[in-house]
Image (cartoon, rainbow, N blue to C red):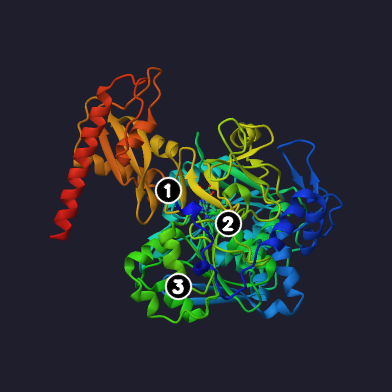
Amino acid sequence: MSEASLPFNEKYSPSIAKVSSGEKRKQIWEESIKNPQEFWAEKAKAIDWFKAPTKVLDDSNPPFFKWFPDGELNICYNALDRHVKTARKNKLAYIWEGEMGEVKTYTYYQLYREVNKLAKALKDLGVKRGDRVAVFLPVIPELPITLLATTRIGGVHTVVFSGFSAEALADRVNDCGAKVLVTADGSFRRGKAVGIKDNADRASSLMTNIEKVLVVKRTGQPVQMKEGRDIWYHDALTAAGANAYVEPESMKSTDPLFILYTSGTTGKPKGVQHGIGGYLVWAYWTLKWAFDPTDEDIYWCVADIGWITGHTYNVYAPLSLGITAFLFEGTPDYPGQDRWWQMIENHGISILYGTPTAVRMFMKFGEALPLKHDLSTLRILGSVGEAINPEAWKWYYRVIGKERLPIIDTWWQTETGGFMISPAPGIELTPLKPGSATLPLPGVNIDIFDETGKPVPAQNKGYLVIKSPWPGMLQTVWKDPERFKLTYFGRWPGIYVTGDYAIRDQDGYFWLLGRADEVLKVAGHRIGTVELESALVSHPAVSEAAVMGKEDVVKGEVPVAFVVLRSGFTASDELRAELIKHVRTTIGPIATPDAVIIVNKLPKTRSGKIMRRLLKAVLTGAPLGDTSTIEDEGSIDDIKAAYAELQYQLAAVAAKKTQ
Ligand code: WTA
């Protein structure tokens, strides 16, 4: 890893803040690890509790840790009511821009009123403490409003990314047992109205529990409203009354706040369950440390609220801090490839929390586009979702940051609730290295282990693990505590396994090296190869499938599928295209395979396990290594031939395009 040995480079130390030795950060980190109880007791004071916790951590039943176990609070109260009581009342909470360029703003007070109306409407529909509310919405203001209204009355939300298929929606809604679904008629994509309600309708025959569906009118396209079940969102708000007020429920700190489904290495996506108190403390402090937002900032986290980044850093963290956040419904390159830069200029955005995939896409579009715009309001740049390669980091730093702004590369996961490894200008900005997420935040007791569970020396690759509980950690996997224990704590007792590879350099900086398991990161979206494989074998033509990640210059990696057909089916371009379409409709467009390679057999060990390592080697052109355990040597030649054939076809298509 040559980048890991990069010495601290003066060139990449931003001049806006004095970069210092890291002594202060080190001291705070050490204190947080030595005395976590005192440390977090102090930090918890930033939150408004209805009943202040007297205990920080109940660790009597690991790994089921309970943070602030006797505290009581309401997260919506922390996001809204407490600001409404102060001069912040009339400060903007959200500036939202739709795909078509329309802008809506909400002050904290206006947001509070909307949330109260919806909270009343949800109550009227029978939602009670602990009930699950499923949310299938594009990024429109009604999305955060629904989350806040749900948590105000003690409900638990499950947001399903609006790009998921009907089947994926139904799976998640059934697993969490939601009674109410909030959706929209549609949303705008590239200037066109696309349906969302129709997807929810397709899912409805599969959804077992849903009693009521609230429908936001976003596009005005025709939709079918089912008598007795479907209600227009605006009608429900009118019925609730313009002055509705709902007392926020006093919740236990350890009550569930939300369930968010994410991919793993086995079975269907798992419902990651976060609690209230620990999560909120974590959300609040991690945003403060990493982005140091102030009252003057306009903060933009580009993530869709359908993912964890949007939950924590578009809703709970910025609102609990009382800052102004920008939300955007749409596509980064519509109507022009400079849409982002145009919006930054128009709204005076000062903190941009983006993604490596977007940066690489903008690199491809060329630097003339951002240079056309006044980006001088920007103060801090961020990155999340996958490792940012040094080239992209440097481009971001040079072209967008004008060699002046720090790049805050934040490493974390759905399960961690918030940032874990990141620069922390809110404490002290330490030197940056392009491609490294730098150092663990306070409270994060992180290490890198070898196969045997021993810490590896500096500069050695290993498994990234977390050795002590932290407030933002998931509580469990919804309805499946065994899976929680096994997935995260099953390898080494008391040790949380992240599933990532990493190395630490001689300065203690962390470099993330991608997943150590069968999970893909496609444009930052987390997709398990097992889900893609199940989708493929659910097609009548497919008997076996193995999906691998292949490097991609923009998306980081893309799925490539090797499939074996059932007898009676023959390989053809039509069938390949159909299988790709089948995955799109079974999971959603984010899971679209880049290619489907049809082979006669997959390489297997004598015990019948697919040798994924060999498939990967074929994709990357790496040496095959040891093949002595292979069941049938011929399978490798078959795969190589099929892959070569595909490469040939792709080259032919590309050549035609450029003609
Ligand atoms: C990857 C997204 C390198 C990593 C917040 C992790 C990253 C997975 C980074 C979690 C980063 C996220 N550098 N890798 N800055 N951020 N990852 O649950 O593999 O969608 O395990 O959470 O994304 O993905 P998830």
Q: Residue at x 21, y 43 (%)?
A: 647
Residue 295 x, y percent position in the rendering? 66, 77
Q: Is disc 3's CB within 8 Å of ligand 1?
A: no
Mark 2 or 3: in front is: 2
Residue at the image point whose x is 33% and y is 34% from the top: 615
Q: Nearer the viewer, residue 656 or 87?
A: 656
Please give the label number shown on residue 165: 1
Residue type indicated by callout 1: Ser
Label 1: state its secondary structure. Answer: loop
Q: Is mark 2 within 8 Å of ligand 1?
A: no
- Local secondary structure at mark 3: helix
The C terminus, quarter of image: bottom left
Q: Position of residue 419 (x, y in %)?
A: 61, 56
Residue 636: image location, x then y, percent: 27, 28
Of badges 1 and 3, the one in the foreground is 3
Q: Quadrant of residue 100?
A: bottom left
Asked if labels 3 and 1 touch by Cβ distance under 8 angstroms, the answer is no
Mark 2 lies on a secondary structure that is loop
Between discs 2 and 3, the one toward the N terminus: 3
Mark carried by residue 400: 3
Query: Gap in Å between the C-alphas at discs 1 and 3?
Result: 35 Å
Q: Residue type at mark 2?
A: Thr
Residue lying at the far right in this picture: please name it.
Answer: 54
* Vertical arrangement, residue 191 with respect to residue 647, above or below: below
Question: 603 or 201, which lies in front?
Answer: 603
Q: Can residue 204 be seen in this view?
A: no
In the rendered structure, which amino acid carries the disc numbered 3? Ile
Residue that mark 2 sits on: 438
Nearer to us: label 2 or label 1: 2
- Relative to residue 280, is residue 516 drawn left or right? left
- Circles 2, 1 touching at the beta carbon (< 8 Å): no
Residue 237 in view in this figure: yes
